[in-house]
Each structure stands twice: as C-alpha cells, then as structure tokens.
Image: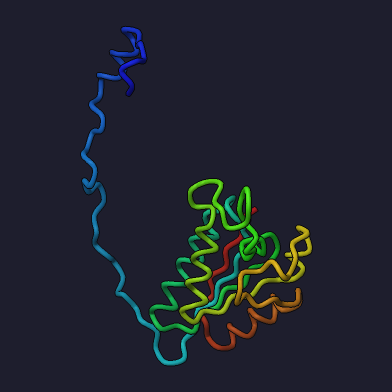
Amino acid sequence: MSDNVELTDLEQKSLGEIPHPSLPEGSSIYGSTKVFPDYQAENGEAYFTLVHGIAHESSVSFVAVLQATRALRKGFETAIYFYGPGALNCLATRGFPTTGNSAFPGEHNINNQLKTFIAEGGKVYCCRFGLSLHGAREEDLIEGVIPAHPLDVQDAIIHYARKGAIINSTYQL
C-alpha cells in the first residue's frame, strides 16, 4: 500500500487483524496426488470436443481447447468443433485497437492455443452458421480452421461416435 494513503484507525485495525499474505508466494495449499492413471491413446483412438461458449465470456471454451490439446499430445486423433456463439473463438480478427493487440491480458489465449493445437496436428472446425449469426466473416478465421456447414455439427458427432471417440461437449451462454 502506498505511504501517501491516510487510513482511519478502524481501517488500520482491519488491515492488521489477519497478516497478509497469510502464506508466502509458492506455498502449497493443495495436494498433488493424481488419482487416475495418465492414460495415453491406444492405436486408432479419437477425442472430439464440441464448443458452444462465447469467447472471453466462457472459461469453459478455453479449458476445452486445453483439454483437447492434452488429448492430442497423448496420441489421440483430436478435433474441436466450434458452433453457435462458439464460432467467435475462431476469429483471427480479435484485438483492440487493432487486430492482434490484446486490450486485456489473456485476450488472445484461445487464439494462441488454437494455433498451437493446429500446428501440433489437431483439426479445428467452425460452423459457418455460427459465424453468420454474429456477422463474422469466413475470411477472418484463424489460419487452418476448417469452415463447416451447419448440418455438419450432427454428422461430425455421428462420425466421431462411430469411431468410438471420447466426446467432450461444452455448452455455455
């Protein structure tokens, strides 16, 4: 706290009741035991994620991309399908005051993680109808994102279900 700020006696008393920080940085407050085995993909296994969460309004969208990246690194054939408002996660035109500039820390987390996911061999699909609902243009997609017809959402699920894929569906509004 700045030395220039004047505090009342009650404010001083309140600040002094509990020492801050109560634990020094780097202190463990959670255990680290992993309960389940660290499964790796067996030959031919697939992992499919559906995302229907709005960029930056839904942490579940970012977590879904991180989970898909982890599955990809475990050897699963992995794809992510963004639909509805989730399609906005695939835009390369995010930024302020210009594209690519982060107006706040983390604004490009999803963009950067999708680029990593694609570079490592994952497939990203984006529903054209989801884009159209928000006036987003297909040419504004992150490089490597595959535009898909609205009827592909259901058929993609069938495709990956028939492959025996693990299907992770996230939905948030």
Q: Is residue 152 left or right of residue 1?
A: right
Q: Quadrant of residue 172?
A: bottom right
Q: Residue at image x 74%, y 71%? A: 128
Q: Residue at image x 56%, y 47%? A: 103
Q: Residue at image x 55%, y 72%? A: 49
Q: Residue at image x 63%, y 48%? A: 97
Q: Quadrant of residue 124?
A: bottom right
Badge count: 0
Position of 63 relative to 128 (above/below): above
Q: Colour mode?
A: rainbow
Position of 25 relative to 121 (above/below): above
Q: Position of residue 16 (x, y in %)?
A: 25, 19
State which quarter of the image contains the N terminus. top left
Q: Position of residue 142 (x, y in %)?
A: 61, 69
Direction top: furthest residue = 9
Q: Position of residue 113 (x, y in %)?
A: 49, 66
Q: Quadrant of residue 9?
A: top left
Q: Is residue 82 left or right of residue 35?
A: right
Position of 66 relative to 125 (above/below): above
Q: Which of the two residues, 122 or 159, is positioned nearer the viewer here?
A: 122
Position of 121 relative to 117 (above/below): below
Q: Which of the two residues, 150 or 98, is positioned nearer the viewer here?
A: 98
Q: Which of the two residues, 8 or 84, is positioned nearer the viewer here?
A: 8
Direction bottom: furthest residue = 43
